[in-house]
Image (tube, coloured by chain):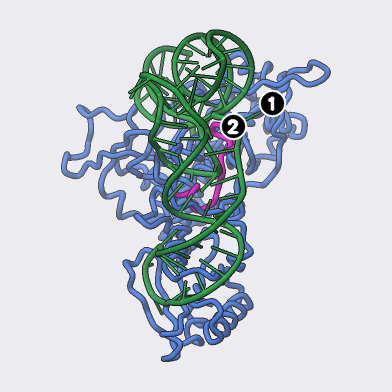
Amino acid sequence: MRLSRYFLPTLKENPAEAQIVSHRLMLRAGMVRQSAAGIYSWLPMGYKVLRNIEQVVREEMDAAGSQEVLMPTIQPAELWQESGRYDDYGKEMLRITDRHDRSLLYGPTHEEVVTDIFRNAVKSYRDLPINLYQIHWKFRDEVRPRFGVMRGREFFMKDNYSFDIDAAGAVRSYNKMFVAYLRCFARLGLTPIPMRADTGAIGGDLSHEFIVLADTGESAVYCDKSWFKTNPLDLDVDFESDLQPIVDEWTTLYAATDEMHDAADCPVAADQLYEGRGIEVGHIFYFGTKYSTAMGATVTDSSGADVPVEMGSHGIGVSRLVGAIIEASHDESGIIWPESIAPFKVGLINLRAGDDACDAACDKLYADLQKAGVEIIYDDRDERAGVKFANMDLIGVPWQLAVGPRGLKNGVVELKRRGSDGDKEELSIESAIARLS
RNA sequence: CGGAGCGUAGCGCAGCCUGGUAGCGCACCAGUCUGGGGGACUGGGGGUCGCCGGUUCGAGUCCGGCCGCUCCGACCA
C-alpha cells in the first residue's frame, strides 16, 4: 500500500477526549474515530489490526475444536423472558421495539440464542460434546463508557458456548478453553495471567478471568512475580489429550483479582508478590444447567433419561484487545505492534521522493517485497524525513526500511526494528529483501 | 446513576469575568527555497461560537432550558 493513497488520518496532537495512552494513540494513528460515547468506527488500519487479532483468535478456537457460527445481533425478548434474564439484566441491555410493537434487544451476550439453537437440534448424548463460537458485535449500554475501545458500549467479541452431557465433560471443555486462551493471548504478544474469578450474578462453579498487566488496567490485581517468566507457547498441546495437568500447572502460581484477594491470607511472600493493575481480556465460565434447565435444553442420556445439558460460556474481548495490546506495547513515539497482528510488517520510507535513485530503489523494494507476500506500507509522499519517521513510529510498523540518497551512494538501505532504540542496520537492497521475506 | 468540568475552523486552544464586525498554533490549498527525525518564507481558503429560548439598540460573552462529550465514584467483556 502506498501511503499517499492510504486513508490514514493521523493527528499530531492529542485529542482532548482521550485520556489513556491506547485511546490517544488509536485516534492519533488514524485507527478509529468515535461516533458516539463508546461507539467507534474502524478506519482502514485499525480495522486491519482488528481483523488480524480476530484471525489469531479464530485459529486457536478452531484448533481447540470449536466451530464457528454467526448469530443475530438483534434477539427476540421472548428467549430472555424464558431464561428469566429479561428482567434481571437491567438497563445495560438495549431494548428495541419493532414496527409491530414486538420487543427485541441488541444482544449483550448469546446464551439464550445458542441454547435455543441447541435444544431444537440436539436430542442425544451421542451428539455431544458440541462447542460453538462466533466473533461479532455486541452492545452493552454501559453507564460510563471510557478508555476508548477498551470499555466501549458496542464491542467486538469472540464468545463460545460448550455443551456436554455431564460435569466431567464440561470440565474437559472448560480446560480446552483454558489452554486455548493461554495460547491465543501469548500469540498476540501478551502475557496472560488466569485468575480465579468471582462467578457473580450468573452463578456457577468454575471461572477464570484472563488478565493482562497494564498500569492503566481497570482492576487491581495481585500475582506471584514468577508469572512474568511464563510462556504458554512453550506448551506442546494436544487438545484431545487430558489437559488437566496443564490447567493445574497454570493455576498453581498465585494470581487473584481485587475481589478475590485477601492480603491477610495471601500465600505469596511480600517481596515475591506483584501488586498492580490489569486488563481483563478474556473470561471462561462453567455454569452447569442454568440455561438448559430454564429453557428445556435436554438430551437423552445412555440410560434413556432426559437430562439438561451442561453448559459453559467463554469470551474474548477482541476490540478491547486492540487497546490492551497498545497499553502493553508502546513508547513515547507511538505504538509498537507485535508482528503477529501488525497492520503492516514493513514500513518503507523514501527519504527523498522525487529523486530518481531513491524512487527506483523504493519501487524495487516495494514490488519485490509485495511479490514475496510481505505486507508493506510505502511512504512515497513528498514529505520531509522527520515527518515520515515520526509517522512510521506512531503507527507502529515493526520494521522500518529507510531509503535515502546518502545510503544509496554506498549501495545500502537502512533497516530498523521499531522499539529497538534506534539501532539501524545498513544492508544492500537484495539482503534487505531476503531479510524481510 | 450521584458529583465535577468542558462544548469557539479538521486537531489543540485563547476570547466570556467587564456585551460592540471571531482570533492564535498545527493541519489544509498555491508558490518559492529547502531536503536523513514533525523545516522556512509569501499568499490563500475554511466558523450559522453545541441547540432552543430570553435579556439588550446589540449576545461567542449575561440568564434559563435542553443536548453532547470528558473526568471522579458505584457497575461491567
Residue drawn at the location 50% of the way across and 86% of the way down: A429
Parent chain of label 1 = A
Residue identified by numbered label 2: A311
State the blue chain: A
Q: Percent x, y for residue A61?
A: 58, 49
Q: Secondary structure at mark 2?
A: strand
Mark 1 to mark 2: distance in Å?
10 Å
Instruction: From the top left corner, tell me how far across and down residue A128 is, in percent.
Output: 66, 39
Q: Which chain is green?
A: B
- From the top left corner, tell me how far across and down residue A91 is, in percent: 57, 18
- Extreme right residue here? A100
Segment tinted magenta in the rendering: A25-39
Task: Pick the residue in front: A391 or B21.
Answer: B21
| Number of other residues with Cα within 10 Å of mark 2, as a class: few under 14, some 14 to 19, many 20 or more | many
In primary-sequence order, the first of circles 1 and 2 is 1
Residue occupied by mark 1: A297
User: Which disc is residue A385 wearing?
Assistant: none
- Residue B35 vertical position relative to residue A147 in the rendered view, above or below: below
* Tags 1 and 2 touching, CB below 8 Å: yes
Residue beneath the point at 40% across and 69% down = A417
Evaluate whether residue A53 shows in this view.
Answer: yes
- Say which amino acid is labelled 2: Met
Instruction: Report which quarter residue A118 is drawn in.
Output: top right
Q: Nearer the viewer, residue A415 or A68?
A: A415
